[in-house]
């Protein structure tokens, strides 16, 4: 009897210990973690891809997909968010959004995304996969919403915002509806841009979860994917991935609806990564270019990518200077 009691007691305390360890692990997973950046890649503790940036007040946010596979294909179950007030001291917040948070999404493709603020809410536009009523799969764009830039975010519609069936008149591929970027113009009108092989745009209603009007094909020379729209002064800039392996090129216009004048290459081939995805934002008076490469070694590559950041400069005529990708990043000397 004594032996039995001792065994039961041991099992009971082992069970309690396991529960405590599990709770501690979950607590750590759901708690912010902090670290200092010292060079590029910016985040070295996990693989991050397809960065988007958002500035809210004195805080710089980076959103990225997470490469979780073994480097043999895209395995991206969730998105990540990081924040900083000085671009050196960073906080990684709990996962703000996962592919499975969209009930209509199929597969594990948490591809490129962007978060934008409006009317006190934050809207998270994502690339994922959708299956139509006939069972055919295609890439699609969804939107989630939160009260905070770090989430948690939840599906804002319950259905996809853009599906492949909406763009088959321009292409016959199933993967052209990816890489959303949203820009709110000075008059308050919001626009969604996206695409692969063909760039598209459409107006968004003020609620940011419904489209308005027709899809417009955007004529861009040598467009591959990954559009990003920003404005400086009176000029609009539409930058995008071009070729494959990809570089970043850009075009300019004096109107958000174009026409767009091609201006050339902005960022060269991105290390040993076939893809090249970027964001351009102004923060505390300076302009920054956020991108990814395959720079974390020895495993870095096209399916194990890493986010980087470098300064962006303009010429006197408003054109952008070619980005100088550096290992030092913003910190002068790589460590």
Image (cartoon, helix red, strand yellow):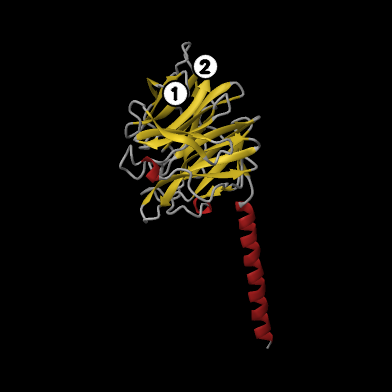
**The N terminus sits in image quarter:** bottom right
Q: Which residue is mark 1?
A: 323
Label 2 crowding class (10 Å Cα cut-off): few <14, some 14-19, many 20+? few
Image x and y of residue 74, in percent:
40, 48
Identify whether 251 is placed above or below 62: above
Q: Residue furthest front?
A: 213
Identify whether 136 is placed above or below 88: below
Identify whether 2 is placed above or below 328: below
Label 1 crowding class (10 Å Cα cut-off): few <14, some 14-19, many 20+? some
In-image side of 247 versus 308 (left or right): left
Q: Which mark is residue 234?
A: 2
Q: Nearer the viewer, residue 224 or 118?
A: 118
Quadrant for residue 264, please give it. top left
Q: Residue at x 57, y 40 (%)?
A: 123
Image x and y of residue 46, in percent:
50, 45
Q: Secondary structure at mark 1?
A: loop
Q: Residue at x 46, y 23 (%)?
A: 237
Quadrant for residue 303, please give it. top left
Q: Secondary structure at mark 2?
A: loop
């Amino acid at each position: 009897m004594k032996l039995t009691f001792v065994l039961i007691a041991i099992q009971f305390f082992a069970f309690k210990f396991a529960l405590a360890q599990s709770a501690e692990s979950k607590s750590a997973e759901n708690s912010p973690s902090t670290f200092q950046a010292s060079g590029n890649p910016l985040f070295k503790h996990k693989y991050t891809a397809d960065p988007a940036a958002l500035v809210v007040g004195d805080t710089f946010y980076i959103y990225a997909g997470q490469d979780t596979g073994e480097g043999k294909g895209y395995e991206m179950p969730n998105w990540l968010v990081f924040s900083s007030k000085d671009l050196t001291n960073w906080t990684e917040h709990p996962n703000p959004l996962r592919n499975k948070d969209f009930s209509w999404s199929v597969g594990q493709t948490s591809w490129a995304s962007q978060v934008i603020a409006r009317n006190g809410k934050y809207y998270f536009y994502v690339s994922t996969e959708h299956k139509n009523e006939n069972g055919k799969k295609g890439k699609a764009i969804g939107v989630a919403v939160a009260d905070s830039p770090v989430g948690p975010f939840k599906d804002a519609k319950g259905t996809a915002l853009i599906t492949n069936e909406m763009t088959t008149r321009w292409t016959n591929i199933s993967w052209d509806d990816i890489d959303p970027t949203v820009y709110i113009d000075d008059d308050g009108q919001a626009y969604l841009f996206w695409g692969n092989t063909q760039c598209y745009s459409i107006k968004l209603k003020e609620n940011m979860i419904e489209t308005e009007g027709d899809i417009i094909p955007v004529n861009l020379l040598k467009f591959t994917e990954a559009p990003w729209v920003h404005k400086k002064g009176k000029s609009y800039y539409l930058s995008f991935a071009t070729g494959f392996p990809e570089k970043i090129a850009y075009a300019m216009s004096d109107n958000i609806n174009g026409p767009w004048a091609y201006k050339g290459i902005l960022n060269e081939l991105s290390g040993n990564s076939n893809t090249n995805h970027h964001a351009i934002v102004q923060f505390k008076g300076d302009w920054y270019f956020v991108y990814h490469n395959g720079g974390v070694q020895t495993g870095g590559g096209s399916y194990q990518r890493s986010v980087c950041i470098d300064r962006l400069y303009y010429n006197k005529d408003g054109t952008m200077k070619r980005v100088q990708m550096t290992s030092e990043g913003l910190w002068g000397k790589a460590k």
